Image (cartoon, rainbow, N blue to C red):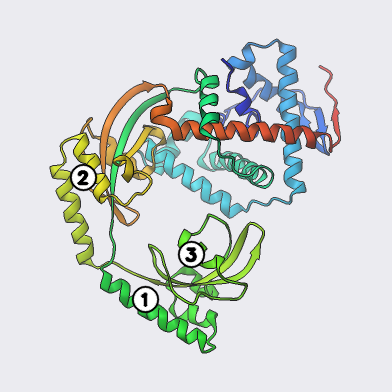
Amino acid sequence: MKSLAVMKRFVFALFGLAAFAVAEPVLMEGVAAVVDGKPIMRSEFLNNLYRFQETPEGSAMSEADQRKYVLDQMIEEKVLLSRIDRDSIVVTDAEVDQRVNAHLSQLAASQNTTLSMLEKAIRAQLGISMAQYRDQLAKQIRGHIEMSRVRQRHIGAITPTKKEVDAFFAEYKDSIPQQFNCVLLSHIQLPIEPDAAIVDSVKKIADSLIDTLNLGMSFELLAKAHSQDTSAAKGGDLGYFKRGQLDPAFERALDQLKNGQYSSNPVKTKLGWHIARVLGRKEDGVRSAQILLRTIPTAKDTAKVIALADSLQKNIKTTEAFAAAAKKYSEDKSSNFAGGRLGWFQRNEMEPAYVEPVANLNVGEVSEPVLIDGAYHLFRLDDSRQTRDLNLDEDYGKIEQMAATHLENQKLEALVKKWREEVHIEIRMTE
């Protein structure tokens, strides 16, 4: 069987989250190659070479092939960096910082520890401060985002057919990593929703605001006065979003509007009622504004959901009973049709909010109701294993994503070969 090395082709040096070295060897400095004016330093090349030599793929090569492979990957990395510059792709510090914070929070949650304890562990195990770790992580994450933007611009999303997924699994199944310390979970999601009378009363207010707009009142002034959203201070301006990033109902309303127009009827989402407005369009997205009037559940609405969750938790005894309850009550459309089945997770890769409710469950047990993002959840531990191999029946979604990434990498590989011909490459290292 073939290895998955091709899937890692463009993440070898820049995008692999390698362990941070405490002390690097002292190397003779010099320039190994220059790609489109960007140097590859000899020390950088040798450090990557040493890491590659320790991998199974690298150890199977001769030293000459190792050196050629590593330098080739680093050249192609620089070609990609050159493309990032040419495409004027900009990743803000705020975006990177947000991703770093989310990563650290998830890491702490997966280890069932606090951020302060995580900081101590980083210092003890890696010999660096949290600030240094954040800087290293920020560089990696910035690279991931930049790479994602290149993929979006030149490749787009690839959805493999079932035939392609099956073929990918048949070819690479022996190289797909096993899962370790993993759990099979199901859940029931019970959102706290406001009473119909509240929904209707808020809609009437939204209708009256649209009437006011029709009389010539400024959208910005009404948003500042009435919108229950952080965008109110900016006159409702949400900024620019690509297609698929906003609520589907809100996006459908925007699709019906021309620049400057607002919706003639309020738009309902899980947040409440929106008056949507288009401020401008680009090829792959829209700049919009809104006046949001939230529909906020009462204490009575919350108590009703808690009572249902408690009742289900106490009375569900079997896998079949849990699946039937999920189909009847769960509002998670991605899992309720499958009896609430979420699939297999490694414990260290679970959603942070799932970790604590599941931590002490035995197989077959259902968790106490837990509040996550405005809904109460019941989790059931269906199975638990120390190691397992992925298979198409239980892990089709994961394998489908691997197949999509593989196809994207093949397309990107062809593009990089083309881009490589467009830049000046000078190899200076002769040994």
Residue nearest the observer in this picture, 409 or 68: 409
Question: Which residue matches tag 1?
Answer: 203
Q: Residue at x 37, y 32 (%)?
A: 344
Q: Secondary structure at mark 1?
A: helix
- The residue at which mark 2 appears reads as 368
The numbered mark at residue 129 is none
Measured in 3D between alpha carbons, the distance from the residue under mark 2 to the one under mark 3, in whole angstroms, is: 34 Å
Task: Report the residue marked by disc 3.
Answer: 250
- Measured from the top left, where is residue 114 in percent x and y? 37, 42
Badge 2 element: loop
From the image, which quarter does the N terminus lie in?
Answer: top right
Q: Residue at x 72, y 38 (%)?
A: 80
Mark 2 or 1, nearer chain start: 1
Residue 247 shows in the view? no
Residue 82 placement: quadrant? top right
User: Residue 185: percent from the left, percent from the top?
Assistant: 31, 36
Identify which residue is drawn at 63% across, 11% down: 60
Q: Nearer the viewer, residue 58 or 338?
A: 338
Q: Nearer the viewer, residue 104 or 216?
A: 216
Neighbourhood count class around disc 3 (C-alpha, 10 Å): few under 14, some 14–19, many 20 upward:
many
Query: In this view of the protein, which residue sits in the foreground, 418 or 77?
Result: 418
* Image location (x, y in percent) of residue 352: 38, 43
- Neighbor class of circle 1 (other Cα within 10 Å; few <14, some 14-19, many 20+) is many
Of the residues shown, which amino acid type is indicated by label 3?
A: Phe
Distance between the Cα atoms at labels 1 and 3?
A: 15 Å
Residue 211, x across and y down, in percent:
46, 85
Q: Is the residue 91 above or below the residue 256 in the image? A: above
Earlier-in-chain disc, 2 versus 3: 3
Identified at 18% across, 53% down, the residue is 308
